[in-house]
Amino acid sequence: AQRVTQPEKLLSVFKGAPVELKCNYSYSGSPELFWYVQYSRQRLQLLLRHISRESIKGFTADLNKGETSFHLKKPFAQEEDSAMYYCALYGGTSYGKLTFGQGTILTVHP
Amino acid sequence: KAGVTQTPRYLIKTRGQQVTLSCSPISGHRSVSWYQQTPGQGLQFLFEYFSETQRNKGNFPGRFSGRQFSNSRSEMNVSTLELGDSALYLCASSSIQGASEQFFGPGTRLTVL
């Protein structure tokens, strides 16, 4: 079975502070991991995927297979980062099925 | 390219009725996945279609069904609606064979009274 856990429902930081959104997963094979973001009144959109290893909007995420984690990090949070963040897992033979965590609401205060 | 579109955006139905939701994927995308989003359960996978074939199905009752047309547009149908079916229904399309990287539509908000 595949599972994604985001332990924090809510996360509040001040502008300019570092932010880390935690994601742990359970999967027996080699998964693909993603972070999706949903800004207020907008659709769910892909933020980054572990395969591309790129930084989007200053966010990075490293897949740690030993700890089965895929935490999202940003060194200096901005107010426009306030949104709901979802970690998602795709298993190799899942055919179109993303397994999502429960999401973390990030609020960046001025 | 235009994004994934879903119609209608809002629906109000009563218990026992049935409903059909539509999804048009990004041009060229052949995989369409459907999800149910609720405050309590979060995002849950319903099913996925590729080239008019259902390749995967989530853990939902048979009242939930879908289909895909030759132009990759997809519909999902919920029969005998229950109050618990009230949710945001999202569809997502992918150009990748395995359909891992998905692009989401705005969703259809279904309210069952």
Image: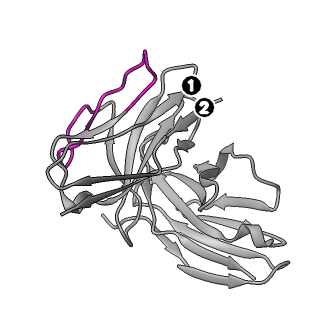
Residue B8 on the magenta segment: no
**Residue A21 x, y percent position in the rendering:** 36, 42
The image's mark for residue A2 is 2
What amino acid is labelled 1 in the image? Tyr
**Element class at badge 2:** loop
Q: Nearer the viewer, residue B24 or A63?
A: A63
Image colouring: one colour
Q: How many marks?
A: 2
The disc, 1 or 2, on the residue closer to the chain's N-terminal end is 2
Relative side of A75 to B106, left or right: left
Which quadrant is home to the C terminus of chain A? bottom left
Q: Residues within 10 Å of mark 1 (few under 14, many from 20)?
A: some
Dots 1, 2 in contact, CB < 8 A: yes
**Residue B101 x, y percent position in the rendering:** 41, 43
Q: Is residue A60 above or below residue B46?
A: above
Q: Is residue A93 above or below residue A85?
A: above
- Residue B10: which quarter of the image? bottom right
Disc 1 and disc 2: Cα gap in Å? 5 Å
What amino acid is labelled 2 in the image? Gln
Relative side of B78 to B68, left or right: right
Q: Which residues are magenta?
A: A52-70
**Element class at badge 1:** loop
Q: Determine if marks 1 and 2 fall on one subunit.
A: yes
**Residue B17 x, y percent position in the rendering:** 81, 80
Residue occupying the point 43% across, 19% down:
A67
Residue occupying the point 53% across, 37% down:
A4
Subunit under mark 2: A
**Residue on which the image places disc 1:** A27
